[in-house]
């Protein structure tokens, strides 16, 4: 392995290692990004808008949610707030990864933190030893460009599908949400309660015409999250040895 004269691994070697580690993520993004592009076309986004969303947002679940909200005619503020809530976990991931990251160079961290996703975090967090900026840039860039490019390819494919098939693709959006939800539900009972409560609140707010569809989703998500965390906290206090 190429090293500098000081005995440290060179940035180019780190970048190569990160790129190699990111290949599996890039391959995994292929079908998901492709489907996003297809659904973006169905939702009425142009290829430029599809590219821009993937370039600026780079968050699979949030982009799918955004498409769903756009089809409901939800306002910009509600969409931004909803995706912010969905991505709050990224603060925790960034804090955790910072413990392994190379000290200093805050500017570099600020840049590559944009590419922090569930997948890039998992790879970086399980890497042995210190995570240096060269490694992170290699890992993030290959994952990022895979997502952006295949989003565009999906839109181009969608544009060439028959009109009736394009319209039927909207069903795939709900199938994707189910696909994202089911694995979490299998691993955690908390995810089941969250999903059930959010769905119940959203139904009440929407059917009762209490809130607009966009706000109904935002408020339902917040209420379900607050109640779930409150229940966990209260149950923790009742367990012997957990009282304050």
Image: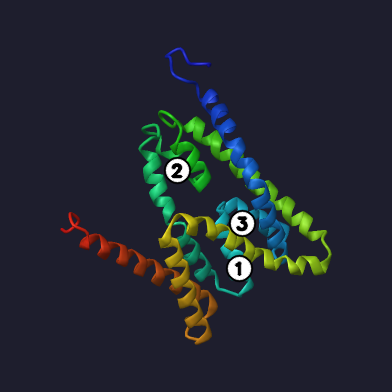
- Mark 1 crowdedness (10 Å alpha carbons): few <14, some 14-19, many ≥20: many
C-alpha separation, residue under disc 3 versus residue under disc 1: 14 Å
Q: Secondary structure at mark 2?
A: helix
Vertically, is 187 above or below 23?
Answer: below
Q: Which mark is residue 110?
A: 2
Is 201 placed left or right of 166 in the picture? left
4, 39: nearer the viewer: 39
Viewport quadrant of the C terminus: bottom left
Residue 70 on image: x %, y %: 61, 70
Which of the two discs, 1 and 2, sits closer to the camera?
Answer: 1
Residue 68 on image: x %, y %: 60, 68
Mark 3 sits on what residue?
Answer: 53
C-alpha separation, residue under disc 3 versus residue under disc 2: 20 Å
Residue at the extreme top: 5
Nearer-N-terminus badge (3/1): 3
Residue 174 on image: x %, y %: 62, 66
Q: Pointers 1 and 2 in contact (CB under 8 A)?
A: no
16, 112: nearer the viewer: 16
Mark 1 sits on what residue?
Answer: 68
Vertically, is 84 above or below 205?
Answer: above
Q: Which residue is at 57% across, 74% downward? A: 74
Q: Which residue is at 38% across, 39% downward? A: 98
136, 217: nearer the viewer: 217
Confirm whether residue 19 shows in the render: yes
Vertically, is 33 above or below 231?
Answer: above
Q: Which residue is at 81% across, 69% downward? A: 164
Confirm whether residue 112 shows in the render: no
């Amino acid at each position: 392995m190429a090293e500098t004269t000081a005995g440290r691994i060179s940035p180019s070697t780190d970048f190569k290692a990160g790129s190699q580690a990111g290949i599996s993520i890039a391959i995994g993004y292929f079908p998901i990004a492709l489907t996003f592009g297809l659904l973006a076309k169905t939702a009425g986004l142009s290829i430029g808008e599809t590219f821009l969303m993937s370039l600026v947002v780079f968050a699979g679940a949030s982009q799918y949610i955004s498409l769903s909200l756009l089809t409901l005619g939800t306002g910009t503020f509600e969409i931004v707030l909803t995706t912010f809530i969905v991505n709050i976990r990224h603060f925790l991931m960034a804090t955790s990864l910072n413990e392994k990251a190379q000290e200093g160079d805050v500017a570099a961290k600020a840049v590559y933190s944009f590419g922090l996703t569930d997948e890039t975090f998992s790879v970086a967090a399980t890497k042995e030893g210190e995570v240096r900026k060269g490694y992170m840039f290699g890992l993030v860039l290959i994952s990022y460009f895979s997502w952006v490019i295949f989003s565009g390819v999906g839109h181009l494919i969608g544009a060439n599908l028959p009109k009736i098939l394009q319209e039927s693709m909207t069903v795939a959006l709900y199938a994707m949400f189910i696909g994202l939800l089911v694995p979490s539900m299998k691993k955690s009972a908390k995810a089941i309660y969250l999903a059930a409560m959010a769905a119940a609140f959203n139904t009440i707010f929407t059917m009762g015409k209490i809130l607009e569809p966009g706000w109904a989703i935002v408020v339902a998500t917040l209420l379900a999250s607050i109640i779930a965390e409150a229940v966990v906290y209260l149950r923790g206090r009742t367990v012997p040895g957990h009282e304050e």
